Amino acid sequence: MVTDYIVVFVTASSRSEAEKIAQVLVEEKLAACVSLMPIHSIYTWKSELCREDEWQLIIKTAIRQFEDLEIRIKQLHSYKVPEIIALPIIKGSVSYLSWISEETQTL
């Protein structure tokens, strides 16, 4: 199934970093909306078990914006390998999906 809309998950090291990334993505119309929430992550990095408090960005955007969004996140992010995972929105309110489309239109 092909969809025009995605949700992208990105983790950040701090609230200020998450807010900075979110603001730039929305201002540059790479995302219609970014929700932020604190999380606790457990993962392996370079063979070491890590436990970190992080911030989760939940980015709502159009799939056509993914490549530019990924590039911009990598430019802004402090992690060497930031999480950038896109999941398709397979169903949604027509009015909400239309709003995503409108807010991610570039001139």
Image: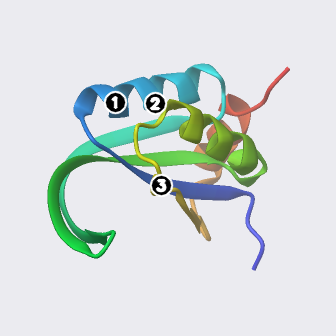
- Mark 2 or 3, closer to the camera: 3
Classify residue 102 by image quadrant.
Answer: top right
The amino acid pointed to by label 1 is Glu
Above or below, 65 against 106 in this view is below
State the residue at coordinates (63%, 46%): 70
Name the residue carrying label 1.
17
Question: Which quadrant does the C terminus fall into?
Answer: top right
- Mark 1 or 3, closer to the camera: 3
Name the residue carrying label 3.
81
Tell me the distance, in whole angstroms, between the alpha carbons under discs 2 and 3.
15 Å
Q: Is residue 107 left or right of residue 37?
A: right
Question: Which quadrant does the N terminus fall into?
Answer: bottom right
Classify residue 39 by image quadrant.
Answer: bottom left
Mark 1 nearby-residue class (10 Å; few <14, some 14–19, many ≥20): some
Q: Secondary structure at mark 2?
A: helix
Q: Earlier in the sequence, mark 1 or mark 3?
A: 1
Front-most of residues 75 and 35: 75
Q: Secondary structure at mark 1?
A: helix
Scheme by which the image is coloured: rainbow
